[in-house]
Amino acid sequence: MNPIINLEGKVGLITGIANEKSISTGVAEACAQAGAKLIITYQNEKTRAFIEPVINRLGVEDVFLLDVTQPDTLDAAFAEIEARHGKLDFAVHSMAFAKRDDLHGRVVDTSPDGFALAMDVSTHSFVRLARKAEPLMEKAGGGALVTMTYLGSEKVIPHYGVMGLCKAALEAATRYMAAELGAKNIRVNAVSPGPLMTRAASGIAGFDGLMAAAVDRSPLHSLVTPEDIGALTAFLVSDAGRLISGGVHFVDAGYNVMG
């Protein structure tokens, strides 16, 4: 374990694990290795079955239902966190969704309902999570919120469609909430990984080409892994990252700097 990343005594919420290859799986593993007490959420009973191996491997005892389209589940999850721990030191938001037609189609053709759904699940859910976490982080004397974004927020990525707009709004929310919550010693950051094959990425047409381009054009000629993302996230939520807030932090072998 790298001694600079020490999460002993900290309680952290990890959302968005879909299976063992998820970005959030790498985050959970890195935080657990650094000594954090983890809380993991699942969207429904079907998804829980897929993440059971992760829960068992990490020895996570607190596993709660959380479907951001169902407000009652958010309320219930945070009520349980408060009852069991009385505080929350960090929370990781890794959720996104858009209808297939809105993801693959032109932005100008996005339906009002499709746009609203994508923004609600992919962006405003982070705002709602932050609002629920705020009082529990105050009790901890401060905390850290981290969300997952992507380069499609600032560059046009083929077949990324409305999700690019959602990620741009997500990064803006990160900056605004960092400014609003800083007085309470709550830091807010976004992590922007390079392309990697996850269940969510498998729904993006031509994603294999994006990964090949990342290897070819990035300065380090390498694909990012969930473990790489986990290492950066664990650093950001640790005391080592205590003065880092409001930023978008790339872990993509340098691909984002290339023209």
Image (cartoon, rainbow, N blue to C red):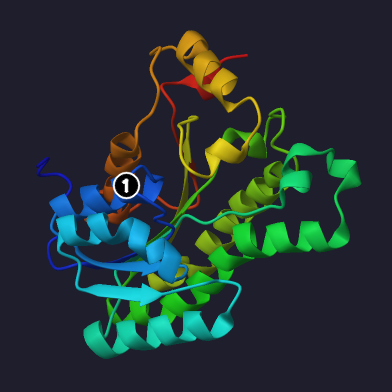
Q: Residue at x 27, y 61 (%)?
A: 52
Residue at the disc numbered 1 = 20
Q: Residue at x 35, y 76 (%)?
A: 64
Q: Is residue 251 visible?
A: yes
- Left/right placement of residue 200 relative to residue 119 reads left
Residue 124: x %, y % from top left: 63, 65
Residue 116: x %, y % from top left: 77, 63
Q: Secondary structure at mark 1?
A: loop
Q: Quadrant of the C terminus?
A: top right
Mark 1, residues whose alpha carbon is within 10 Å: few (<14), some, or many (≥20)?
some
- Left/right placement of residue 178 relative to residue 56 reads right
- Left/right placement of residue 96 relative to residue 30 reads right
- The kind of residue tagged 1 is Glu
Q: How many marks?
A: 1
The vertical placement of 210 against 18, above or below, is: above
- Point out the residue furthest to the top here: 216
Residue 21: x %, y % from top left: 36, 42
